[in-house]
Image (spheres, grey):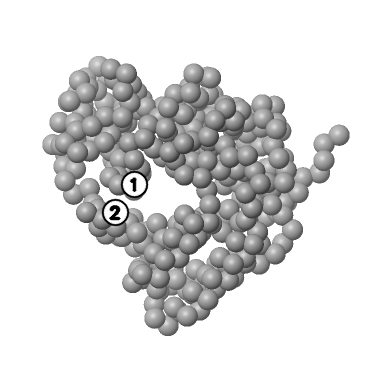
Amino acid sequence: MTQQSFSFSDLTPDLLLDALDSTGIRAESGLLALNSYENRVYQFQAEDRSRYVVKFYRPQRWSNEQIQEEHDFSHELVEQDIPIAAPIKLDGESLLHYQGHRFALFPSVGGRQFEVDNFDQLEGVGRFLGRIHQVSQGSAFKHRPTIGLEEYLHQPRQILENADFIPDHLKNVFFADLDTLIGELSQQWHSNWQPLRLHGDCHPGNILWRDGPMFVDLDDARNGPAIQDLWMLLNGDRHDQLAQLDTILEGYNEFADFNHNQLQLIEPLRGLRMVHYMSWLAKRWQDPAFPRAFPWFADNKYWEGQVLAFKEQIAALHEAPLQLMPQW
């Protein structure tokens, strides 16, 4: 079974409930599907009224060792009183197995949506990201990958070339502009940064807010530069982003030193994410959840828009990177 053709068709409601029963935790409520496409994630209430989230991992994406590294990192952060939704250990094990499926149980953590335009919340998020990276400096992931051009550009380029999504009349200009973008990104990408264990996908949707931030979903955790966990929190025009970045780093620098040279990586990282995201959708298209959730991906207008997006990102790479004023 290839990763491209895999689906969760055998993950029936009965199998889900039987898997939970195997842990000794019985679902009293129905299983509410949460907004996740890479894996299958459900919220439920147990007999003792406790609320849980169960995540069934997509086969062939991560190895057992890679999943366990994510779990161990989560628990290491929790031990330092950092608010992370970490998997529950049952009989000392957090990675569970049932009939060929791997899954994990998490406590259901409530909270409001993180407000990216709330500077008090931004500073709080920055403070905890500094604490996360302070812990991360202790060691790097051994089994999980490090952000780089092969995974984020070259492999995605091959996937897109072999996929049957791009309209014939756009193929020449699409791949010409994609190759120009890849060339620009390759020139601007550098690896003279200390690799940290990262959240990896630290966008506002993966942060809840209660009395402070609660970070969820470390499924994309990997090694990389610190700025990867910061840049997706920035939005708006350049002036807005500078104000947001200054606020985040005010909290961050209380616990970890940020290397301002990494600001040069913001636009390259944005370009890497753009290319990787398209190939991710193409690679997962045979999973029925993807056409339902992303119907626009098969529309000609989407691909026309991507040609324009390539040109805009190439232009952004030629602009001066964000630069904060030095602190005295």
* Rendering coords of residue 47 (x, y %): 21, 19
Q: Residues within 10 Å of mark 2 (few under 14, many from 20)?
A: some
Name the quadrant of the N terminus.
bottom left
Residue that extends furthest to the left in the rendered view of this protein: 14
* Rendering coords of residue 103 (x, y %): 28, 34
Name the quadrant of the C terminus.
top right
Q: Can you say whether 57 is above or below 152 in the image?
A: above
Q: Can you say whether 59 is above or below 153 in the image?
A: above
Q: Amino acid at mark 1?
A: Arg
Q: Quadrant of residue 251?
A: top right
Q: Which mark is residue 61?
A: 1
Residue that extends furthest to the bottom in the rendered view of this protein: 169
SS assignment at label 1: loop
* Rendering coords of residue 291 (x, y %): 30, 60
Q: Is residue 88 visible?
A: yes
Query: Quick one: 253 or 159, which is closer to the camera?
Result: 159
SS assignment at label 2: loop
Q: Amino acid at mark 2?
A: Gln
How far is mark 1 from mark 2, CA to CA?
Answer: 7 Å
Query: Quick one: 291 or 93, which is closer to the camera?
Result: 93
Q: Quadrant of residue 127?
A: top right
Q: Is residue 205 visible?
A: no
Q: Which residue is mark 2?
A: 3
273 horizontally vs 5: left or right: right
* Rendering coords of residue 159 (x, y %): 39, 64
Badges 1 and 2: C-beta atoms under 8 Å apart?
Answer: yes
Picture residue at 61% right of the left edge, 28% below the top: 134
Q: Which mark is residue 30?
A: none
Query: Quick one: 113 or 76, which is closer to the camera?
Result: 76
Picture residue at 67% right of the left edge, 55% below the top: 237
Picture residue at 29% right of the left edge, 20% below the top: 90
Residue that extends furthest to the right in the rendered view of this protein: 328
